Amino acid sequence: MGKALTNPFPDDVEKTKKEIRERADELDSMVGQASDEKLRTAVAETARKMRSVEVEGRGRAGP
């Protein structure tokens, strides 16, 4: 689940947004590899929530 961790104080907002989207895509690709339904749901939900994060600038990130 290290893919879900994000720098809370990004210097480059656009780079951070791109990295979050890429990591969410990676999580989505892992959903089918999860061994049980609860884990698949948790991974898919984490990816969905990552995509909804708004990165607003240095020191300001939120859902």
Image: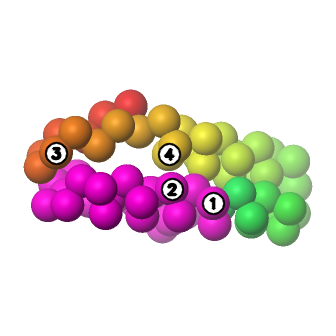
**Residue 47, position as x, y percentages in the image:** 60, 49
- Give the prevailing secondary structure in the magenta stretch: helix
**Residue 33, position as x, y percentages in the image:** 84, 68
Q: Earlier in the sequence, mark 3 or mark 4?
A: 4
> Which residue is pictured at 63% across the width and 60% down the height?
25
Quote the CA–CA distance across marks 2 and 3.
Answer: 16 Å
- The residue indicated by pointer 3 is 57
The quarter of the rendered structure image containing the N terminus is bottom right
Q: Which range is magenta?
A: 1-26
Foreground: disc 3 or disc 4: 3
Numbered circle sitting on residue 25 = 1
- The residue indicated by pointer 4 is 50
Residue density around tag 1, few if under 14, some if 14–19, many if 20 or more, within 10 Å: some
Residue density around tag 2, few if under 14, some if 14–19, many if 20 or more, within 10 Å: some
**Residue 26, position as x, y percentages in the image:** 63, 66
Quote the CA–CA distance across marks 1 and 2.
Answer: 6 Å
> Which residue is pictured at 31% across the width and 63% down the height?
15
Determine the secondary structure under disc 2. Answer: helix
Pointers 2 and 4 in contact (C-beta within 8 Å): yes
The quarter of the rendered structure image containing the C terminus is top left
Q: Earlier in the sequence, mark 1 or mark 4?
A: 1
**Residue 56, position as x, y percentages in the image:** 22, 39
- The residue indicated by pointer 2 is 21
Q: Amino acid at mark 1?
A: Asp
Pointers 1 and 2 in contact (C-beta within 8 Å): yes
Residue density around tag 4, few if under 14, some if 14–19, many if 20 or more, within 10 Å: many
